[in-house]
Image (cartoon, helix red, strand yellow):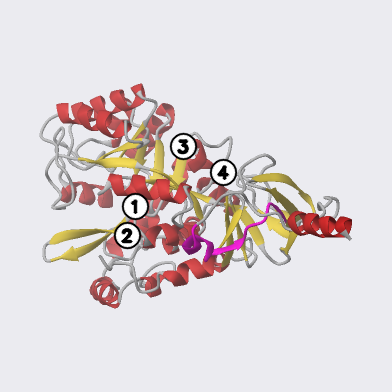
Amino acid sequence: MKYLLKTLVFLLFTSIQIHAQKFTKEVKAFISVDTSLVAITNVKLIDGTGGDIKNNQTIIIKDDKIERVGNSNTLKIPKNALIIDGTGKTVIPGLVMLHEHLFYTKFFENWFSVGQSTFTFPRLYLAGGVTTMRTAGSIQPQSDLNVKQWILEGKMTGPKMDVTSPFIEREGVPIAELGYIKNTKEVSEIVDFWSKRGVTSFKLYNNITKEDMKVCVTEAHKRGLKVTGHLCSVTYEEASNLGIDNLEHGFRVATDFEVNKEENICDPFESRQAFDSEPIDSPKINHLIEVLIKNGTTITTTPNVFEPYTNRELIPGGGERAVTPEVLKDVKAIYDRRVNKDYVQIDSYHKNMTWLKRFYDLGGKLVAGTDPTGAGRTVAGYANQHTLELLVEGGFPLVDVIKICTLNGAKYLNQDEIIGTIEKGKTADLILINGDLESDIKQIRNTEIVFKDGIGFNSKKLFESVDGQVGRN
């Protein structure tokens, strides 16, 4: 009898082995898979490498790692594994997105109002399949660093995070939450201060000088950190030649097309008109692409924030349910004013996508993000899924879209040895989608389980948990 009881106890603890990581009850509410041995069988696999799509695959997850990947007909499933039947479903790596924020921008009188989305956005990012993200500029970097730590400790629900510094900016754009520098000396002080507190990159903004950039790049690289920029006063070519690592928003904010541009001066209206009027096959864009590729400068595409209004969703990706009624009313008012009057925006959007694909096809380093700011249409999680839809719409092959949104991001963060693809030995960050992504990219909206470090989170529950909350400051 004693032997039988020992055997039963042994079987109880080995049949479904629980992960060692501790989570609060609030986080546990969203976990649907928390066993140390999982087999996803008979699934379509897009592994993030850019290689061929594979059908009828089995993925074995042990603890937080991918133990084996192979054909379901030949791969032996370990005893006591929790089996998830993936018939009719697709698995892709967890998304690695590089232009994200934990704040949400609204309009207030003639000013921008920026409010933290400290609790809603981490849940939404994870719900949308983002397992690793970089904030591309912080309004409250200490808040972002705390959230990062609490997620790691299992106290909050969200993706793994790389945190970027506050925006480095001289006075210009009327955003009260920005801290403006008065001289170049402050740049080195910012890099020194925030590098000691855990940020992994620095964000340059519209109104800076080339000297500001030079100091930022030098000081960041000295510490093994990176610099990105949403630029205006400094051109893309100037920035690339100064050694900036990353440029945000595709080519849409580049000021390289202005005629007789003043050095270190940002004129957003002039630059926008110059972009809009630049011929799609102009020598300027071809020269710029050549420079960026030669220097190894990474471009982040953020198509959601530039998506036109005509024949498009009110909140792209289907995120109307996430925002407060007041925000939804404001967003719809902006939408109604612009719909069917945005022909210039439509042309510029497609031009930017054409140039991005040209850059990528020629060997340029391309990553993706969402930038949940602007006119309130871009909502975390929903926008991340929609990014994949927009890239497919823009002519990128599906396997390349997945690679751009996973492995390329991991490479930029110097984490491609552990995340970014579904391969033996890598961290078990992956997305189970209830549908065939190869036949219809919009099946991405049917994300079922998001595995982060081998723990499976229920996407639907995460989305539902913040319904009507985004924009409630």
Q: In whole angstroms, how far apart are the C-alphas of marks 2 and 3? A: 24 Å
Instruction: Say whether marks 4 and 1 touch (CB < 8 Å).
Output: no
- Could you say whether the residue bearing mark 1 is in a helix, strand or loop? loop
Of mark 4 and mark 2, the one earlier in the sequence is 2
179 w.r.t. 114: above or below: above
Viewer-proximal residue, 346 or 54?
54
Q: In whole angstroms, how far apart are the C-alphas of marks 4 and 3? A: 10 Å
Total numbered circles = 4
* Amino acid identity at mark 3: Leu
**Image location (x, y in percent) of residue 268:** 18, 48
Quick check: can you spot residue 249?
no
Q: In whole angstroms, how far apart are the C-alphas of marks 4 and 1? A: 20 Å
Viewer-proximal residue, 242 or 321?
321
Q: In whole angstroms, how far apart are the C-alphas of marks 1 and 2? A: 8 Å
Identify the residue at image location x=35%, y=72%: 314
Of mark 4 and mark 3, the one earlier in the sequence is 3
Which residue is the site of mark 1? 101
Which residue is the site of mark 2? 117
Magenta residues span: 24-38
Instruction: Say whether marks 4 and 2 touch (CB < 8 Å).
Output: no
- Could you say whether the residue bearing mark 4 is in a helix, strand or loop? loop
Identify the residue at image location x=36%, y=60%: 119
Q: In whole angstroms, how far apart are the C-alphas of marks 1 and 3? A: 16 Å
* Amino acid identity at mark 4: Gly
* Amino acid identity at mark 2: Ser
Q: In whole angstroms, how far apart are the C-alphas of marks 4 and 2? A: 26 Å
* Amino acid identity at mark 1: His
Report the quarter where the N terminus lies.
bottom right
107 w.r.t. 23: above or below: below
Which residue is the site of mark 4? 420
